Amino acid sequence: MVKHRKAIETLEPYRPGKPISEVKRELGLTEVIKLASNENPLGCSPKAVEAIIKWTQEVSLYPDGNCTELKGALAQRLNVEPEQLLFGAGSDQILEIIAQTYINPGDTAITCWPSFSRYEAAIQVMDGRMIRIPLTRDYRFDLNGILNSITDTTRIIWICNPNNPTGTIITAEELRAFLEKVPQNVLVVLDEAYYEYARCGDYPESIELLKQYNNVIILRTFSKAYGLAGLRIGYAISNKEIIELLNRVRGPFNVNAAAQAAALAALDDQEFVQRSIQINQEGKEYLYQAFEEMGLEYIPTHTNFIMVNVGRNSLEVFRDLLYKGVIIRSGDIFDMDNWIRVTIGTPQQNRRFIEALKEVLKR
Ligand SMILES: Cc1ncc(COP(=O)(O)O)c(C=O)c1O
């Protein structure tokens, strides 16, 4: 047998949210809703669908590896230079490109836990080691804890803002004070996958920080508010020097042409994004009220998902909800055993979830 790399031995495969088709088949259900992967319950912009249909005539051609048209449009929207942008097959792929660019064997990275599990996987594959700092008592990133853990081997700090799975943010003021204290030779990755849902109030407009700090990468995605998760497209914003390095590691055709066409069209439909934010806000208020009426503790969220304490084994609640045709995420994967994470859906989906949860918890 061919010997695999040692770094692979401790890697755990990603546990995705259960697909609707599998649940229908396994449990013989006809009506199943998935509130497990923080997808957009409205789907995506009709303009994006049109662009995909048009693209089918060009399916035999390789995509534009530089994503030129999309890059130009996004640069204009964000008020940055095109050379400050890099696209990936989801921001997931960019996490990997960052680790491949910066991590030598024995290097370390720091993040908080519970947070997005792919940071650790990206570091481990490169023979690096992740240091996990617990979230604060109010489920937020512990920036002081991170600062205190920086050593000579630290290369990357991952900040999930807002944090998945807790939905909490660090504020503009906190972020600026933090960046002042991080050594210039440590990269800070700001994962803003839920930026569109979070932006307002104290949430940082992090692009401004790129002018002042040359060790920052921002990650955003078309998977959430733009509703294009199935196509796999996300992007990094940083200074030209960092982007040029990441670009050396990126595969030549890493973003498919359908994703590029759809993202370009989706950018042009901000009305859809606004509608998504609005329905999310209404759903959030409905769920807060329902949880309060049920006497359940929840973590106020800046995202399109909510973590709620169901007061019993989350895997059991997950399984019981599954039998009722509702797929959510159990908290055990985040070491939050009595909690579940639910994506905010359409009004109808939210009502169905609450009805099912009430029945499950009655038992
Ligand atoms: C915090 C966070 N970062 C990154 C991602 C990956 O998103 P993408 O679909 O762009 O790969 C997700 C997806 O759930 C996420 O929650």
Image: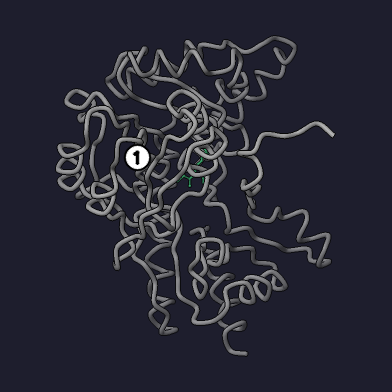
Q: Is residue 229 left or right of residue 277?
A: right
Q: Is residue 253 left or right of residue 87?
A: right
Among the 4 quarters of the image, the one containing residue 49:
top right
In the rendering, at what x and y percent does residue 353 appear?
Answer: 57, 70
**Mark 1 Cβ inside 8 Å of ligand 1:** no
In the rendering, at what x and y percent does residue 66 appear?
Answer: 51, 11
In the rendering, at what x and y percent does residue 300 appear?
Answer: 34, 65
Which residue occupies the foreground of this view, 289 or 206?
A: 206
Residue under the image location 63 percent in, 70 percent down: 318
Which residue occupies the foreground of this view, 327 or 107?
A: 107
In the rendering, at what x and y percent does residue 199 appear?
Answer: 29, 44
Q: Is residue 302 left or right of residue 173?
A: right
| Colouring of the image | one colour
Q: Is residue 346 above or below residue 230?
A: below
Which residue occupies the foreground of this view, 67 or 238?
A: 238
What is the count of numbered marks?
1
Q: Is residue 327 above or below residue 358?
A: above
Crowd tier of the residue under label 1, counting other residues whose Cα lies within 10 Å: few below 14, some 14–19, many 20 or above: many
Q: Quadrant of the C terminus?
A: bottom right
Residue under the image location 62 percent in, 72 percent down: 315
Q: Kindly identify which residue carries mark 1.
A: 157
Q: Is residue 180 above or below residue 130?
A: above
Which residue occupies the foreground of this view, 195 or 189?
A: 189
Say what secondary structure mark 1 lies in.
Answer: strand
The single residue placed furthest to the bottom in the displayed view is 363
Q: Quadrant of the N terminus?
A: top right
Residue under the image location 59 percent in, 70 percent down: 352
Q: Amino acid at mark 1?
A: Ile
Q: Is residue 131 above or below residue 65?
A: below
Residue under the image location 45 percent in, 39 percent down: 272
